[in-house]
Image (cartoon, rainbow, N blue to C red):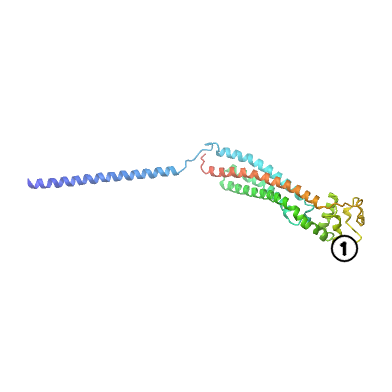
Amino acid sequence: MQLVSKRLPSFQAQKLKCYSRGENETVTMAEEKKKDGTALLAKKKKVKPRKSRDADCCSVNFLKCVLHIFNVVFLFAGAGVLGVGVWNVTYRHHYVSLLPTITYPAIGYLLVIAGSFGLPFAALGCCGLKTENRTSLLCYTYFLLITFILEAGAGGLAYYYEEAIEEELRAGLNSTFTTNYALDTAVTDAVDSMQTEFKCCGAIRYEDWRKSRWHEHDPRLLVPDSCCKTRTQRCGTRDHPSNIYYTGCIHHFTNHIRDQLIILAAVGVGMSVIPIFGFLFSCVLYVKIKHVID
């Protein structure tokens, strides 16, 4: 009896210990399950649900429709910029050889380049929208940015040069007249054309021609024949006001170049606004296509 009574407390102690161990394991398993559930919920929160094409106001279909309309506008705008650039290069570069820098012709060529991008970039945009190819859309977005830089750069340069052209002409036009006339064919043709068109003579005044190399070659000719009111062979031997123009060409030429620069600045800056809208819409569409299901 004493042996049985001694073993009984020991058996009860072992049973209590096993029960306590099992309870601890149960608590541990519950905590692990809770942690696993929390981690799974966090993962679900990180994964963004895919949206349908018409899920919100800026849906994929809406953006595609807007960009198709934009492509049409961009195409016509590019044609307009190209037309202005070609017109400037073709018909308004008669006097480029008289300018001290290449800024003015560079503006026209920048507009020609920017305008010529209209058709290929619009075609690329349409292909990207039709196939929903994100690489094509990305290239289209970068090309719109390049177009914006070219047009805005041309417009800004024209605006800046419009302020600086008068000082440049005052510093260099007279030297061009007196030094290169009759020696450089392009300068000679430009000077004769200018004096005939603007009805002027010399850069600052008609006496400037007496200091020129051209006058040293033939001192009997006081001014070129293009200074004459009625142009005839060797009419420049007489500098009477009834025969020649007394007004210098610099003011007429400055105003002429300024008028052209104002047009170029308005076209460049004005048209550069259009690619910005396409750039923004294409960026949004590029992001949204990634999270869309059919």
Residue in view at x 61 percent, y 39 percent: 66
Marks counted in the figure total 1
Please state the horizontal and vertical placement of residue 113, each as a whole percent of the image: 69, 50
Please state the horizontal and vertical placement of residue 129, each as a whole percent of the image: 59, 42
Say whether residue 283 is left or right of residue 270: left
* Residue for badge 1: 216
State whether residue 213 is above or below residue 263. Answer: below
Q: Residue furthest bottom?
A: 217
Q: Nearer the viewer, residue 223 or 290?
A: 223
Amino acid beneath label 1: Glu
Q: Residues within 10 Å of mark 1 (few under 14, many from 20)?
A: few
Q: Quadrant of residue 281?
A: top right
User: Can I make out residue 34 in this image?
Assistant: yes
Please state the horizontal and vertical placement of residue 53, each as a whole percent of the image: 53, 38
User: Can I make out residue 112 in this image?
Assistant: no
Say whether residue 88 is left or right of residue 153: right
Residue in view at x 66 percent, y 43 percent: 74
Residue in view at x 68 percent, y 46 percent: 269
Please state the horizontal and vertical placement of residue 141, each as a whole percent of the image: 60, 47
Q: Quadrant of the N terminus?
A: top left
Q: Nearer the viewer, residue 86 or 190?
A: 190
Label 1: which secondary element: helix
Q: Nearer the viewer, residue 121 or 235?
A: 235
Q: Residue furthest left?
A: 1
